[in-house]
Image (tube, helix red, strand yellow):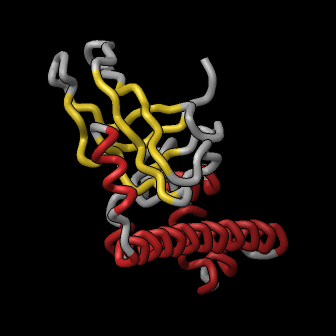
């Protein structure tokens, strides 16, 4: 069957056959890697630098492919997912600098969120490791009261500290790495 990439459809399409909402399309048009894309993402391994790629739109409800979508790609940037080739070509011609800056700003924000998430997880793992090392050497109560370990106190008191720490840092959906609800607002 092979490896597919997923392109999210915003707005979702509706199946012409049954009317079901279709919010994503899978494609083998790009370099295989099980990647997920949305408008504004750089496409890895696109067979074209700029142009239009046609893809069948599969309905998971009725198992039909009665329609197509067209990826509008401008210098390896996915700038649109359109319902017809003319709209896709127009979309490519209409890309402007303000849009490019918006895409760049969004990707920088996403990179900062991932950096913050990684840094927090790494710090908590390091503190858990230090806690366990110090607990082996001295009094558990003295180590527990050390302010350095305040952030991980809830984890060290659990039956499985590492498991609790992993669960606390787990994305809502590990497949698409969606952040835990509420984290994005606090950032």
User: Residue 103: x percent and y percent?
Assistant: 42, 69
User: Residue 32: x percent and y percent?
Assistant: 64, 37
Between 130 and 19, which is closer to the camera in this rendering?
Answer: 19
Q: Residue at x 18, y 22 (%)?
A: 16
Q: How many marks?
A: 0
- Quadrant (top left/top right/bottom left/bottom right) for the C terminus: bottom left
| Residue 19, quarter of the rendered image | top left
Q: Can residue 154 be spotted in the picture? A: yes
User: Residue 38: x percent and y percent?
Assistant: 41, 51
| Residue 119, quarter of the rendered image | bottom right
Q: Residue at x 29, y 37 (%)?
A: 84
Q: Is residue 51 above or below residue 180?
A: above
Between 8 and 66, which is closer to the camera in this rendering?
Answer: 66
Between 34 and 137, which is closer to the camera in this rendering?
Answer: 34
Q: Residue at x 22, y 24 (%)?
A: 15
Between 81 and 94, which is closer to the camera in this rendering?
Answer: 94
User: Residue 27: x percent and y percent?
Assistant: 50, 32
Q: Is residue 60 above or below residue 154?
A: above
Q: For the view shown, which residue lies furthest in the right direction?
A: 137
């Amino acid at each position: 069957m092979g490896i597919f990439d997923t392109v999210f459809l915003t707005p979702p399409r509706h199946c012409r056959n049954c009317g079901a909402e279709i919010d994503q399309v899978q494609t083998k048009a790009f370099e295989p890697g099980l990647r997920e894309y949305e408008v504004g993402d750089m496409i890895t391994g696109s067979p074209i630098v700029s142009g239009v790629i046609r893809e069948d739109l599969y309905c998971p409800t009725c198992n039909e492919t009665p329609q197509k979508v067209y990826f509008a790609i401008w210098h390896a940037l996915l700038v649109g997912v359109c319902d017809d080739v003319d709209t896709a070509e127009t979309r490519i011609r209409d890309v402007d600098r303000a849009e490019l800056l918006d895409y760049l700003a969004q990707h920088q924000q996403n990179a900062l969120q991932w950096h913050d998430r990684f840094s927090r997880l790494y710090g908590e793992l390091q503190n858990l490791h230090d806690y366990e090392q110090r607990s082996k050497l001295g009094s558990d109560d003295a180590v527990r009261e050390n302010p350095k370990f305040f952030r991980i106190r809830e984890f060290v008191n659990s039956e499985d500290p590492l498991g609790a720490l992993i669960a606390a840092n787990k994305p809502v959906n590990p497949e698409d790495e969606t952040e835990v609800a509420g984290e994005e607002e606090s950032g």
